[in-house]
Image (cartoon, helix red, strand yellow):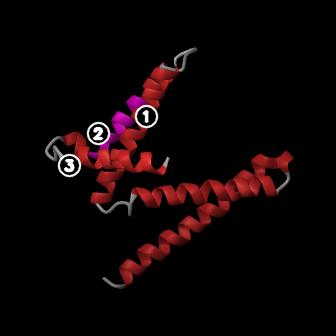
Amino acid sequence: MNDLIEKVLDLAKKRNSFDKKNPFYVNLEKYLERLYNEINEVKDELKEKNSVFLEDEIWDCFWILFCLSQVLEKEWKIKSLENIFKRIEKKYKQRLIAVFSGDFENKDKCWQEAKKKQKKELILEHEKLYWEKLKFN
């Protein structure tokens, strides 16, 4: 799976590099608009015996996100797509641990408590990152 993700990410990098004047490849609003449209296309394909088209539309959402991540990385708005994947893994691993180690009958409460804790951690990380930058400027 990791090899596939690397191959697709490489394709997204190539795609973003070949027409830098086209507003779609540099305009964040265009990416978000296109993602919204693709999500609606996923909704349209939620039918019986339609997996081929549904998978294709779901992939379009991933593709837009992969390409968007490249633009955000170039603009220094994010560190990297790899960093996003690390955050995803950490986030949901912590939440699942909270659910499965807690009272399973109150799993929604455990999930919500994990979310609150993570939100506080993000706020602290954000403040530390941007406070450090301010301190040295």
Binning the other alpha carbons within 10 Å of mark 3 as few (below 14), some (14 to 19) or many (20 upward) gives few
Instruction: Identify residue type, mark 3.
Output: Ser
Mark 1 and mark 2 in contact? Answer it, CB < 8 Å: no
If you read the primary sequence from the N terminus, does the residue marked by circle 1 or circle 2 appear first? 2
Q: Name the residue tied to disc 2.
A: 30
- Magenta span dominant secondary structure: helix
Discs 2/3, front: 3
At x 65%, y 56%, the residue is 93
Vertical position of residue 128 compared to residue 136: above or below: above
Binning the other alpha carbons within 10 Å of mark 2 as few (below 14), some (14 to 19) or many (20 upward) gives some
Q: Which sits in the foreground, 43 or 66? A: 66
Is 28 contained in the magenta span? yes
Per the image, label 1 sits on a secondary structure element best described as helix
If you read the primary sequence from the N terminus, does the residue marked by circle 3 or circle 1 appear first? 3
Q: Name the residue tied to disc 1.
A: 59
Q: Name the residue tied to disc 3.
A: 17
Q: Is residue 27 left or right of residue 87?
A: left
